[in-house]
Structure formats: C-alpha cells, structure tokens
Image (cartoon, rainbow, N blue to C red):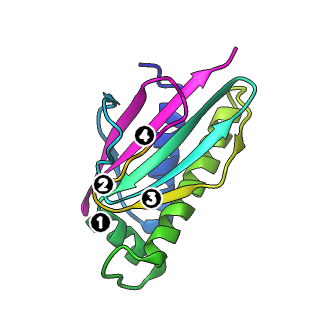
Amino acid sequence: MDDKFINPFSESLINVLATMAMLEVKAGTPSVKTHEIAHGDVTGIIGMTGEQAKGSFAVTFTEPVILEITRRMLGEEVSGIDETVTDMVGEITNMVTGGAKKFLSEKGYRFDMAVPAVIAGPDHVIRHKSAQPVIIVPFSTEAGEFFMETCFEELR
C-alpha cells in the first residue's frame, strides 16, 4: 500500500482539526475498502486531477463526531446534521485538501481541485473516480471515530 497519497491527507486532516476545532485526532491503520457504503453519517468528497496523477479524497464523519467538531468550530450547539453541519463538512474537506495539495506539490505533484460534494444520510454511497483501490483510514477522537478515504492513480 503506497502511502504517498495517504500521508499528506492524514497529516492535513490532523492539523486542520487540531487547529480549527482544538480536537486531538489519532490515525488508525490504513486498509483497502471493499465496498462503497460510507462508515458514517455525512461525507465530504473532492476530486483532484493533474498531469502526474488523479484521484479523490473523502472524509466521513459519524454524527457525534461532526456535531462536536461543529460545536467547537462555531461555538454553538447543533442538534443534528443540518445545513450548518453539511457546510462545515464541505469547508473541512476544502481545508484538508488544500493542505494536502501543498504537501503533494513539495513532492512534484500539481493538482487542480473540484468543488467538494457533501453527502448525508444513513448508508450513503461514496464513489471514487479512480480504478485504483480505495484506502480507508479510521481516526479516533474523544467524541468517537471518523474515516478518511483516498483513491489515486499515477498517470505517467
């Protein structure tokens, strides 16, 4: 399992949540995801294309985790996944991807980014556009678990 596309997103995700939500996040062990069903309640997904590689990044939050992140980032209580929460997921997806894009550019990868899409609901589907395996990484916080997915392929 090649970590050149996993680590930049993982590091950026940890940095964004530590900085913006003051939340300690620990990464678990990456594995290959074998289905398209999300492991959480709301997902932000974004596509990236470049001359050297293309792929996508997704982050899926369980409801307790994203409600805690939203509370910490906005300073207000939210009672369920609503427009405020889905906007937050889109913003987190953008921030994480921007940070990962910076890490990847230092390794010679240049990417254009799409606008993130946010999908919510039980058992929603996450579809990556690359033919490569989807790598999923669990993360743990004091509020519970959430998951990151990356799926990239080299074009050279």
* Mark-to-mark CA distance, 4 and 3: 14 Å
The secondary element bearing badge 4 is classed as: strand
The amino acid pointed to by label 1 is Glu
* Mark-to-mark CA distance, 2 and 4: 12 Å
The amino acid pointed to by label 4 is Glu
Q: Which-is-in-front pick, marks 4 and 3?
A: 3
State yes or no: discs 1 and 3 in contact (Cβ < 8 Å).
no
The residue pinned by badge 2 equals 40
Residue 145 magenta-highlighted: yes
The residue pinned by badge 3 equals 119
Looking at the rendering, in which quadrant would you find the C terminus? top right
For marks 4 and 3, the one nearer the N-term is: 3
- In the drawing, does residue 11 fall left or right of residue 123? right
* Mark-to-mark CA distance, 3 and 2: 10 Å
Q: Is residue 21 above or below residue 132?
A: below
Looking at the rendering, in which quadrant would you find the N terminus? top left
For marks 1 and 4, the one nearer the N-term is: 1
Q: At 32% across and 44% down in the image, what residue appears?
A: 37
- What stretch of residues is rendered in magenta? 127-156
The secondary element bearing badge 3 is classed as: strand
* Mark-to-mark CA distance, 1 and 3: 13 Å
- In the drawing, does residue 93 fall left or right of residue 107? left
* Mark-to-mark CA distance, 1 and 2: 7 Å
* Mark-to-mark CA distance, 1 and 4: 18 Å
The residue pinned by badge 1 equals 63
